Image (cartoon, rainbow, N blue to C red):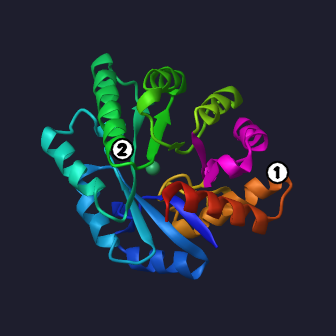
């Protein structure tokens, strides 16, 4: 039994065979799936997915869309978050990867505060996206520590020191396909040093395909590759890793 806690099955890359991919995930032992719906134009597609029993959703506004998001989008988001199968708000956060302008960074931070407040109001965990912005995120979260609900740093790719700071603040770390790459020494060190009770398994599909399937589109059934690599790093059995990380996800999302 395993949970993919971070999938984007609504993505256009699954338009041709979405039902087959979902069925393959459940047939391969994926127990539950959390769809991350963080682009406004995918929200309605995610609502469709919720008709299936074992699919839950997080609604949010991704930082790369922060400048486009309107007041109407935020009021729609507020309604979506109240859906009984919405188990988190996100992913939202900071993304400096594409050289965000100072104006864009202001918009990302405003969006971050709005969504933190929304999650607090409806008592939902948060899924934080952070790319090339870990130091800023740490400063920011420390400033807002009084309103931070429980959260996960999705697809963690920072340093061991940064991972410790987030874990001390109460965050979980999301581990994805890059853990299986040969050059991921720093990430492997983070996984080795972090207590397994703080780890969640994610795919971030259709992106970040694990090494075994590299070059192909990622999909929820490949999440087991992440668990296998965690088991190798921590010198545990795969079964034990699956059991613990599944339990972590069940408790974290309340599913
Ligand atoms: Zn994602």
Task: Give yes or no for residue 186 being in the magenta stretch.
Answer: yes
The kind of secondary structure element at disc 1 is helix
- Image quarter (top left, top right, bottom left or bottom right) of the N terminus: bottom right
The answer to whether residue 254 of the structure is visible from this angle is yes
Q: On the rendered structure, is 111 left or right of 171?
A: left
Which contiguous range is marked in magenta? 171-200
Residue at point 53%, 78% (across, down): 26
* Image vertical order of residue 15 relative to residue 100, above or below: below
Q: Residues within 10 Å of mark 1 (few under 14, many from 20)?
A: some
Could you tell me if residue 215 is visible in this image?
no
Mark 1 and mark 2: span between their CA atoms?
33 Å
Q: Residues within 10 Å of mark 2 (few under 14, many from 20)?
A: many
Seen in the picture, residue 207 relative to 221 is either above or below; the reply is above
For the point 52% across and 45% down, which residue is it? 154
- Residue 151, how many percent across, how many down? 50, 43
Q: Which dot, 1 or 2, sits closer to the camera?
A: 2
**Farthest right residue in view:** 235
Disc 2 beta carbon < 8 A from ligand 1?
no
Residue tagged 1: 234
In the rendered image of this protein, does residue 198 appear above or below residue 25? above
Judging by the rendered image, the residue that carries numbered circle 2 is 119
Mark 1 CB lies closer than 8 A to ligand 1: no
Residue 175, image x and y in percent?
Answer: 62, 49
Q: Secondary structure at mark 2?
A: helix
Q: Quadrant of residue 57?
A: bottom left
Residue 3 vertical placement versus 66 (above, below): below
Sequence-earlier tag: 1 or 2: 2
Q: Is residue 183 magenta?
A: yes
Q: How many marks?
A: 2
């Amino acid at each position: 039994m395993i949970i993919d806690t971070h999938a984007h099955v609504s993505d256009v890359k699954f338009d041709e065979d979405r039902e087959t991919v979902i069925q393959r995930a459940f047939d391969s032992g994926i127990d539950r799936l959390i769809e991350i719906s963080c682009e406004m134009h995918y929200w309605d597609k995610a609502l469709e997915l919720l008709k299936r029993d074992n699919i839950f959703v997080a609604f949010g506004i991704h930082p790369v869309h922060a400048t486009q998001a309107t007041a109407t989008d935020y009021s729609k988001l507020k309604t979506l978050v109240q859906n009984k199968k919405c188990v988190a708000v996100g992913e939202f956060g900071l993304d400096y990867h594409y050289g965000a302008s100072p104006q864009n960074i202001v918009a990302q931070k405003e969006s971050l505060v709005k969504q933190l407040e929304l999650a607090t109001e409806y008592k939902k965990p948060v899924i934080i996206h952070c790319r090339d912005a870990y130091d800023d995120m740490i400063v920011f979260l420390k400033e807002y520590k009084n309103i931070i609900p429980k959260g996960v740093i999705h697809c963690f790719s920072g340093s061991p020191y940064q991972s410790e700071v987030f874990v001390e603040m109460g965050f979980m770390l999301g581990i994805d396909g890059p853990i299986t790459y040969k050059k991921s020494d720093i990430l492997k060190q983070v996984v080795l040093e972090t207590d397994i009770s703080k780890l969640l398994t994610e795919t971030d599909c259709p992106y970040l395909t694990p090494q075994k399937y590299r070059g192909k589109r990622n999909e929820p059934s490949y999440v087991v590759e992440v668990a296998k690599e965690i088991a190798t790093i921590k010198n545990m059995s795969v079964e034990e890793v699956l059991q613990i990380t599944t339990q972590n996800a069940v408790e974290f999302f309340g599913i």
